[in-house]
Structures are given as structure tokens and as C-alpha cells.
């Protein structure tokens, strides 16, 4: 392990610690992060997930090499900007239900307290249900309930030491049995939905304006174009795993982004007022359009700053597949690399003395100006593996926030306790209690 000799020498210090039998190196140089995230598959790979974590979700986010390339190639068309425009009515319908539900909760004084974390989880679940399967949240609710329970069980199990070849996951404890039951039930529910869609496609009755329809359409096209190639398309099991990923990542990412945004706007009413004024200037009381959302500069600045302070994923992990030179260091195979997103985002070295403060103004001229073209802001990852649903999530979040600002003002509840907590994603540990005031349209 001679490469460790340079860990505290020279200009660039590379801290490391032992994670079980493996050395884990923390990379805090933007150029080295760029090298890692842009490198070929045979240089760096994502850390392999334990069998317990695989029970939650696999999909394109977890795959490597040619399998990742095939899945990404087939899924990409479903997230094209033109396809997003087709989904705007579905986004709008979900917002209608959210606003109507909140308006019904208002008392005679048009004021009420609510936990927006729970509300946005329900809202984003509705969005994913409609945009993935063309069904309402009520119809897809069982999957979300099961996935939420599975997340808790998997996280509890993942905190225990995993030893390859020996694992207590095979012991028929109550938790292990429940995890397996949930895995089987979610798989069965998704398989049924997919088979129904396949039947509808054969009968010429299928819609192709949701993610499942677009995915199956793209998959069919690749199967026809690559019929001379083995494994040119996705199997039913592959599609099931991608749908699990849509449900899990699509719901959680947007719900926490909206939650943290409501919290910081409650803490900074001046920015809340600026965002509302911009929304009213662009849309008035009309429903937002795709083109109009792209003109919301202040809202975009706010979202970027929220993603800087509270990125959904706090770190990325890779490991070296072979001996590789990275900067002035040479790493042997099997070294784990930790890319700490949240440390980059909060670094005074990169962002200045106000790095811990909420200041959307830093993004007034865009991300490249704010970062001085350095890779110090990457809430959705970076490079070939950048989150495929980034535009989807931001469009959904902009639509929801615009509709909320048109109808409500928000302030923090005295019962809110600020405690960011990482359980797979960064979320408020004790909920997000806010007080909403219903506004009277001008």
C-alpha cells in the first residue's frame, strides 16, 4: 500500500480511512472528481450493493458496463424534452389535487398547519403513478406504501456489517421474512401492470404518453433494430427493475427538493416574495406552461441554492477496477473513492464565507458563473451517469412551486425542528411543519 505514503505530503492532501478491509479515500479536488466521473467503466465502477440493498431497487442507476449502456440507451428517449412537454397535463392534474386538498384544510381564517414532507411525498407519488403508468396515486398507492416500508427495513439491515458468503439475511427472522414478502409483492404488482400494458399494445389500445409506454416503445424499437444482436432489448424483469427505480428515485428526489424549498422560503420571506412576484408576472393566476417555467429565473436560482445546501444524495461512491493514476496519486485496484457532494456544496474554499447561508443570488448568472466552471456543484451527479430524470424532477418541482406560490404564503411552524437527516436521501428528521396562509386572487 505504498500509495498511502503521499496522503499527507505535497500540496493536495487526500484523507483516507479504513472501511472494513478496504481503504476509502475522500476526493476533494474538483479536477479529480471530474476525472473519476468521466472515466471509462474499466477504470472506476460504482460500489457494488449488498444483496439486501438490491431488494429495494436496481435499474439503470445501479448497473455497470455494457448493461448500463444498454439500459441507458433504451430509457433515454422517454426523458427527452418533447416527451416532458407531453406530460405537462399530468403534472398539472397532480398539482390540482394538491392545491384542492390544501384549500379544503384551510379554516375560516384561511390559515392551517401542515407537514409538507408528507404532503410532497404523496404529491410526487401521484406524479410518478400518473406519468409512469397513467394511473392515479390511489391505484398505485400500494406500491408506494410497500416501497416506503421496504426502505426502512433495508436501511436498518444495511447498517449491520455485511460479510460476503455469510449473512444473517438468510435467517428467517420477522424482518427478513417481511423484506422478502415486500420484494415479491412489489414485483408481482409491477409485472401485472406491465403485462396489462403489453396486452393493450397488442390490441392497439395502449397509450404511449407515459414513461412505461415510452419505455416499452423504445425497447420494441431497439429489439427490431438489433435483432441480429443478442440481448438488444430489455426483459420483463429489466423493465420491472426500471419501474421500481422510477417509483423510488422519482418520488424521493422531488419530494425532498420541494420540502427543503418550502422550509428555506419560510425562513427567507424576501425570497418567497420575489419568487411569487415572478410567478405572477409570468403566469398571473393561469396554470403554468412548459415554456413559461423556463422563464422563471428567480425560482430556478432558488432551486439551485436549495440543491446546493440540501442535495438529495450527500455523496457518490466509486472503486478502482485496476491500478490507476489519479492526479499525483497512483491507486491499486479495490480502493473505494468517496466523492462528498455535500462537502463540496458547503465548502468556504469554493463558495466563500457565506457558504453555509441561503443565497440564491450566487446563481444569478447561471451555474457555470457561480462555480467558475469547476465541478463543485453536482446534486444530480455528473458525466455519462448524470441523473436521467434531472429535467423531469426540476419541471415537476417548478410546476408545483409555481402553483403553490399563486395560492399560498408559507411560514415556519413553531413545532418545526431543523434536523437534516440522511436515510438514503437527505430529509428533515422530524418532518417539515409549516403554516400556510391561503391568498385571495387579485
Image (cartoon, rainbow, N blue to C red):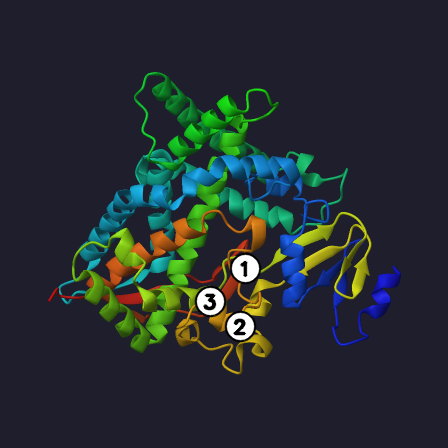
**Which label sits on residue 422?**
1
Q: Badges 1 and 2: C-beta atoms under 8 Å apart?
A: no
Q: Give the quarter of the image for residue 339.
A: bottom right
- Closest to the observer, 242 or 300: 300
- Residue 372: mark: 2
Closer to the chain start, of discs 3 and 2, is 3
Q: Say which mark, if any, is on residue 107.
A: none
Disc on the earlier residue, 1 or 3: 3
Secondary element under disc 3, as helix, strand or loop, is helix
Foreground pick, 210 / 147 = 210
The mark lying in front, picked from 1 and 2, is 2
Residue 414 visible in this rendered orientation of the protein: no
Furthest residue in direction right, as rendered: 2
**Could you say where residue 275 lies in the image, as x and y percent from the top left?**
29, 69
Q: Are there few (<14), some (14-19), or many (20+) residues within 10 Å of tag 2? A: few
- Graded by Cα atoms within 10 Å as few (under 14), some (14 to 19) or many (20 or more), the crowding at tag 1 reads few
Task: Tell me the residue at 39%/49% (across/down).
Answer: 392
CB within 8 Å, label 3 to label 2: no
Figure quadrant of the N terminus? bottom right
Residue tagged by mark 3? 367
Q: In this view, does 267 lie above or below 392?
A: below
Q: How far apart are marks 3 and 2 (CA)?
A: 8 Å
Amino acid at each position: 500500500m505504498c500509495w498511502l505514503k503521499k496522503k499527507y505530503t505535497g500540496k493536495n492532501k487526500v484523507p483516507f480511512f479504513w472501511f472494513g478491509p478496504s481503504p476509502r479515500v475522500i476526493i476533494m479536488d474538483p479536477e479529480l472528481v471530474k476525472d473519476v466521473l468521466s472515466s471509462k467503466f474499466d477504470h472506476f465502477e460504482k460500489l457494488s450493493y449488498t444483496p439486501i440493498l438490491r431488494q429495494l431497487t436496481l435499474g439503470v442507476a445501479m448497473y455497470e458496463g455494457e448493461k448500463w449502456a444498454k439500459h441507458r440507451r433504451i430509457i433515454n428517449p422517454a426523458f427527452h424534452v418533447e416527451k416532458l412537454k407531453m406530460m405537462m397535463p399530468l403534472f398539472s392534474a397532480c398539482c390540482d389535487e394538491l392545491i384542492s386538498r390544501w384549500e379544503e384544510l384551510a379554516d375560516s381564517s384561511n390559515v392551517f398547519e401542515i407537514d409538507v414532507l408528507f404532503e410532497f411525498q404523496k404529491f410526487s407519488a401521484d406524479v410518478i403513478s400518473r406519468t409512469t403508468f397513467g394511473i392515479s396515486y390511489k391505484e398505485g398507492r400500494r406500491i408506494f406504501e410497500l416501497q416506503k416500508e421496504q426502505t426502512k427495513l433495508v436501511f436498518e439491515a444495511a447498517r449491520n456489517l455485511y460479510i460476503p458468503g455469510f449473512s444473517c439475511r438468510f435467517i428467517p427472522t420477522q424482518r427478513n421474512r417481511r423484506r422478502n414478502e415486500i420484494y415479491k409483492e412489489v414485483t408481482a404488482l409491477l409485472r401485472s401492470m406491465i403485462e396489462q400494458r403489453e396486452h393493450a399494445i397488442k390490441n392497439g389500445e395502449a397509450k404511449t404518453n407515459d414513461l412505461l409506454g415510452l419505455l416499452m416503445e423504445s425497447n420494441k424499437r431497439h429489439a427490431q433494430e438489433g435483432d441480429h444482436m443478442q440481448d438488444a432489448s430489455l426483459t420483463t424483469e429489466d423493465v420491472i427493475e426500471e419501474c421500481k427505480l422510477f417509483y423510488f428515485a422519482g418520488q424521493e428526489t422531488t419530494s425532498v427538493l420541494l420540502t427543503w424549498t418550502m422550509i428555506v422560503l419560510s425562513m427567507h420571506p424576501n425570497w418567497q416574495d420575489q419568487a411569487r412576484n415572478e410567478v405572477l408576472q409570468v403566469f398571473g393566476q393561469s396554470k403554468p406552461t412548459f415554456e413559461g417555467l423556463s422563464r422563471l429565473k428567480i425560482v430556478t436560482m432558488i432551486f439551485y441554492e436549495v440543491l446546493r445546501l440540501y442535495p438529495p444524495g450527500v455523496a457518490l461512491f466509486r472503486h478502482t477496477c485496476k491500478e490507476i493514476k489519479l492526479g499525483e496519486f497512483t491507486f491499486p485496484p479495490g480502493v473505494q473513492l468517496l466523492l462528498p457532494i455535500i462537502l463540496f456544496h458547503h465548502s468556504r474554499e469554493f463558495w466563500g464565507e457565506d457558504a453555509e447561508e441561503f443565497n440564491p443570488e450566487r446563481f444569478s448568472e447561471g451555474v457555470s458563473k457561480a462555480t467558475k466552471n469547476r465541478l463543485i456543484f453536482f446534486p444530480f451527479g455528473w458525466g455519462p451517469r448524470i441523473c436521467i430524470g434531472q429535467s423531469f424532477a426540476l419541471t415537476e418541482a417548478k410546476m408545483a412551486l409555481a402553483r403553490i406560490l399563486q395560492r399560498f404564503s408559507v411560514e415556519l411552524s413553531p413545532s418545526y425542528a431543523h434536523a437534516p437527516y440522511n436515510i438514503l436521501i437527505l430529509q428533515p428528521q422530524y418532518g417539515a411543519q409549516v403554516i400556510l396562509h391561503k391568498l385571495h386572487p387579485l
